[in-house]
Amino acid sequence: CPASVKKQLAKVFEESLRTTVPDEPDVVPSIDPCAANKAGVKFADYQCNNAMGLFAKMKGKQTGFKGPQAVGQAIRNNLPQSEMIESCSVAGPGFVNIVLSKKWIAQRLERLLIDGIDKWAPQLGVKTVLVDFSSPNIAKEMHVGHLRSTIIGDTLARMFEFSRVETLIRRNHLGDWGTQFGMLIAHLFDTYPNPEDFTEAAIGDLQAFYKASKVRFDNDPEFKLRAQQSVVQLQSGEEKYHNAWQQICDISKAEFEKVYQRLGVLLEARGESYYNDLIPPTLERLDKLGLIEEDDGARVIFVEGANIPIIAVKRDGGFNYSSTDLAALWYRLNVENVEWNIYVTDVGQWQHFDMVFKAFRRAGWLPNDENEFPKCTHVGFGLVLGEDGKRFRTRSSETVRLVELLDEAKRRCKASLLERDAVKDWSEEEIEKTAEAVGYGAVKYADLRINRLTNYTFSFDQMLNDKGNTAVYLQYAHARICSIMRKSGKDIEEIKKNGNIVLDHEDERALGLHLIQFPEVFEESLTNLLPNVLCEYLYNLTEIFTKKFYTNCQVVGSPEETSRLLLCEATVTVMRQCFHLLGIEPVYRL
Ligand code: ARG
């Protein structure tokens, strides 16, 4: 049976619909959680919305139903016996309002505590998923856009992992190929005649090295010529040039790795260079299918709905970003057998991916129905803005170094920790670890909590505020619940085994209901590839716990202590799962 309450209810209603409208066998139960009205009141937990549509559809047929309310009544009356449902009533034009049994809610929570939250993971029905994310460019800056891609992509990967996708590929499509290597190599040979001297320590700053070589390239014709010749040498596999390229890549990758390590992000690198030899055969296959045309000296592919074609081969005979993505996608579909290919980049690249996917559809390499597997999805995101509303930059330099940005988040968290009395007895290590967990978590959550398609304003003050919708607030709430449980002096593992959960108080019930809704919210968040849905759920959970349950229901020392401690345990279990999916390290005391 599915973990989602919504889906379980749908099963119950499906039975009723079959009896109620036997002539409409295709009708799918439409079940939604009830929204609160303006006064914040909810009349029920869920509602079934089928009556109105069904009545309209059956109009003119001899069904005997006088109106949509009558259909609603019949749906209600034909419901099979179910332990999930406490009561049902028909409201308005025919909504069937459903109140869940609080005993059933409590049982689900007890099972959660015994079986663990993994049992709540949905089955997606896909075996192999690839998330192409982060993907910075060698020697160029890894900018805040790449940070967004890294954070969003990592969360999506974690969500697929939780859903137990058999093979999950976290792919770093590094920009490690292209004409910029010509000038980098030429500049390298000039600056370090002895290749051994070219080390990470010696260079310090690869971005500055890139910039210096670019200045020469733009201003010195002799250098430019040598740079162009170097590209040819590199592409023809000349050892000296290949080694220099490798050296540059290694230094750059080590830089990226520092960011990934801090963020706790796993990636498997397979750069653009990997697909080099696959480009000609891929283009040949496309050519055989008649997709490649000549256009002003270039070889291009036209696709529907785009006024520019994909440039598969440039006028000078060279390949580009698109050629590589064509080959890479072919490889992913045919060699890696990926069923769901996800690309996480800024929205600006939407058209590029749209055209690549369309070319594959034209070739018959992807199904025409975009929702059918194998499928490709571009997960776009908006810009990162500074507090001035312009593109995010630091005061001193035009580019933001990601490592420094993370340092700053940590530094600020550490400073505010040190102001607190509570940390007097903490070890230096605990302070460091906590500052990192809270600081890095805050950067991630600030990004993930808003719909990824919107631009996002980067503000330390906002993301580190302990009162708003921030990871800091969530961490405090989590640590507080842990402290309540510690203070009880009870062995939670022991009471988990025999204790019962009772949801007699309305705030206990509200908390319990929200907790068992985790599976369906998670599923919604994952199928739409929208982490902000999960963030909103987590924030609401925290609010319900703090503002309702904990305000109105005494835990320690109350007659309901056992049940309420179990509710606390269920809450931290779900909170930690959300933290984990969002890549946030939970803090147990603060
Ligand atoms: N390197 C690219 C950039 O920085 C992103 C690559 C995205 N992945 C892909 N398969 N094209 O914009």
Image: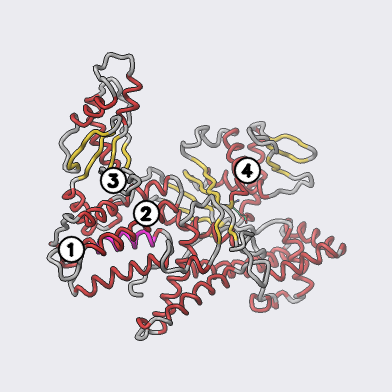
Q: Is residue 17 above or below residue 31?
A: above
Q: Earlier in the sequence, mark 3 or mark 2?
A: 3
Mark nearer the N terminus (1 vs 3): 3
Image quadrant containing the C terminus: bottom left
Asked whether 575 or 127 is in front, the reply is 575
Point 18% across, 56% down: residue = 505
Other-residue count near label 1 (Cα within 10 Å), few / some / many at <14 / 14–19 / ≥20: some
Figure check: 173 above or below 419: above
Residue at (63% x, 60% y) in the render: 391
Residue indicated by mark 3: 42
Q: Is residue 375 left or right of residue 110?
A: right
Amino acid type shown at disc 4: Gln
| x, y percent for residue 252 | 62, 67
Q: Which mark is residue 537?
A: 2
Q: Say which amino acid is labelled 1.
A: Lys
Q: How is the image coloured?
A: secondary structure
Classify residue 311 as left or right of residue 476.
Answer: right
Q: Residue furthest front?
A: 39
